[in-house]
């Protein structure tokens, strides 16, 4: 289960502000849709694949990442 830390908590707020789904543009030109249920944040790609965030807010030297459990792909 993902703990609502700094960035993941902000993501939940954006999802709430957008009535349950927040668009997340990627550098590849796709848009993922972020949702959550309880403490679980999910990302859906343009093909309908859903990935769960399994580890949130992992600080790296060039930013923060979130680990997901599914491969997300551009629209096919």
Image: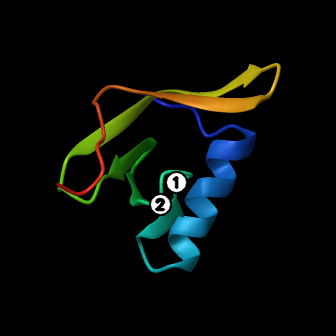
**Residue carrying label 2:** 29
x, y percent for residue 44: 30, 53
Q: Residue at x 62, y 64 (%)?
A: 13
x, y percent for residue 22: 48, 68
**Horizontal side, residue 2 vs residue 36: left or right:** right
Residues 10 and 62: in front is 62
Single out the mark in the foreground, 1 or 2.
2
Q: Dot 2: within a 10 Å radius of its alpha carbon, few (fewer than 14), some, or many (20 or more) residues?
A: few
Compared with 30, 49 (above or below) is above
Residues 65 and 38: in front is 65
Residue 26 has which mark? Answer: 1
Badge 1 vs badge 2, beta-carbon distance below 8 Å: yes
The quarter in which the C terminus is drawn is bottom left
Its colouring scheme is: rainbow
**Horizontal side, residue 30 vs residue 5: left or right:** left
Count of numbered labels shown in the rendering: 2
x, y percent for residue 71: 29, 31
x, y percent for residue 19: 45, 80
SS type, badge 2: loop
The quarter in which the N terminus is drawn is top left
Residue 8 has which mark? Answer: none
Label 1, label 2: how far apart the Cα atoms are: 5 Å
**Horizontal side, residue 22 vs residue 47: left or right:** right
């Amino acid at each position: 289960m993902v703990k609502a830390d700094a960035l993941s908590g902000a993501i939940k707020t954006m999802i709430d502000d957008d009535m349950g789904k927040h668009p997340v543009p990627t550098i590849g030109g796709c848009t993922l849709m972020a949702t959550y249920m309880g403490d679980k944040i999910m990302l859906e790609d343009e093909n309908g694949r859903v990935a769960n965030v399994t580890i949130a807010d992992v600080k790296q030297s060039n930013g923060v990442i979130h680990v997901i459990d599914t491969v997300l792909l551009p629209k096919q």
